[in-house]
Image (cartoon, rainbow, N blue to C red):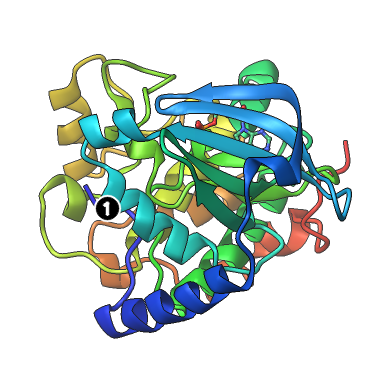
Amino acid sequence: MAIAETHPQQQQEKVSSEASAAEKKRWTLSDFDIGKPLGRGKFGHVYLAREKRSNHIVALKVLFKSQLQQSQVEHQLRREVEIQSHLRHPNILRLYGYFYDQKRVYLILEYAAKGELYKELQRCKYFSERRAATYVASLARALIYCHGKHVIHRDIKPENLLIGAQGELKIADFGWSVHTFNRRRTMCGTLDYLPPEMVESVEHDASVDIWSLGVLCYEFLYGVPPFEAKEHSDTYRRIVQVDLKFPPKPIVSSAAKDLISQMLVKDSSQRLPLHKLLEHPWIVQNADPSGIYRA
Ligand code: AMP
């Protein structure tokens, strides 16, 4: 499944400018000092690394070509690199460049010092309204930026979000996580975040990201996604019917519920536009304008 999208013409422009950017600097492994492992993905490992000349700290993602080929995801990786390397936003993980040798592909990524949001959510169970609103607002700003560049993320969920050194959220995956091992729920998996039009394989547009952000907002506040069910088929049914329920505990304000209800709307044209989301009273009253959550 393709996750991040651009218009074909835009894609063409990206490909040619990417080619010229790649010509500027050809990286090799000897440009880096390799440090501790940061984590493991399906196709390889991520290491802390330092670029020797600038002393710049990065995360180096090492992917094995054989595994990429086996899973037939080389094309998708190429597109992900093209898209992510052109995005510049404080809440989007930078992809500085890439290089490869005979066996491996290396992605030079911005280092997200505070690690995975998913783990943080597990640790806290659920977030305060201030924290949730700060995160949702910063993601809305990142998605407005993406949509302005005709990029639809289509895979917004906690596993794809990292936390930077200041506590700011970083969207980290543009087309990749769908192929990685699902770390959370083997039963429902990625279905939880998909909007009705994608579950039903109907045409979709940038408003799929509004839906996923609504699901994420719910999960931040309640600790579980809204349409979770034991069986895949039940999650499917609940999404299609927009079977949205707000449990009595934890206590969540009616303003937050109002915002979520305006995002999780079946008719994608009726979902609250992201710039309106930023003006919603719950966001205005709770989100830290810096986008940084301070405990
Ligand atoms: P991935 O293959 O992208 O799923 O990455 C595997 C794990 O490495 C993640 O779950 C993170 O814990 C860690 N990781 C990946 N990228 C970064 C990064 N840019 N900064 C810090 N940790 C990272």
Q: Is residue 36 left or right of residue 116?
A: right
Where disc 1 sits, the SS reads helix
Which residue type carries mark 1?
A: His
* Residue located at (41% from left, 56% from top): 80
Residue drawn at x 25%, y 36% as measured from the top left: 69
Q: Residue at x 70, y 21 (%)?
A: 124
Residue named by callout 1: 75
Q: Is residue 174 above or below residue 280?
A: above
Does residue 270 lie above or below 258 as drawn?
below
Give the camera-side residue of 291 and 163: 163
209 sits to left or right of 97:
left
Q: Position of residue 121 (x, y in %)?
A: 63, 26
Q: Quadrant of ligand 1?
A: top right
Compare residues 248 and 203 and report the one nearer the observer. 203
Report the side of 203 relative to 31 (left or right). left
Give the percent coordinates (x, y) of residue 200. Answer: 10, 48
> Which quadrant holds residue 70?
top left
Q: Which residue is found at the position 64% from the left and 41% from the top?
A: 29
Please rate how many residues cluster around mark 1, counting C-alpha atoms within 10 Å: few if below 14, some from 14 to 19, many from 20. Answer: few
User: In this orientation, which residue lies closer to the viewer: 76 or 133?
Assistant: 76
The picture quadrant where one finds residue 151 is bottom left
Q: Quadrant of the C terminus?
A: top right
Please name whichever residue, 62 or 276, is drawn nearer the observer in this view of the structure. 62
Q: Is residue 248 visible?
A: no
**Left or right relative to 202: residue 284:** right
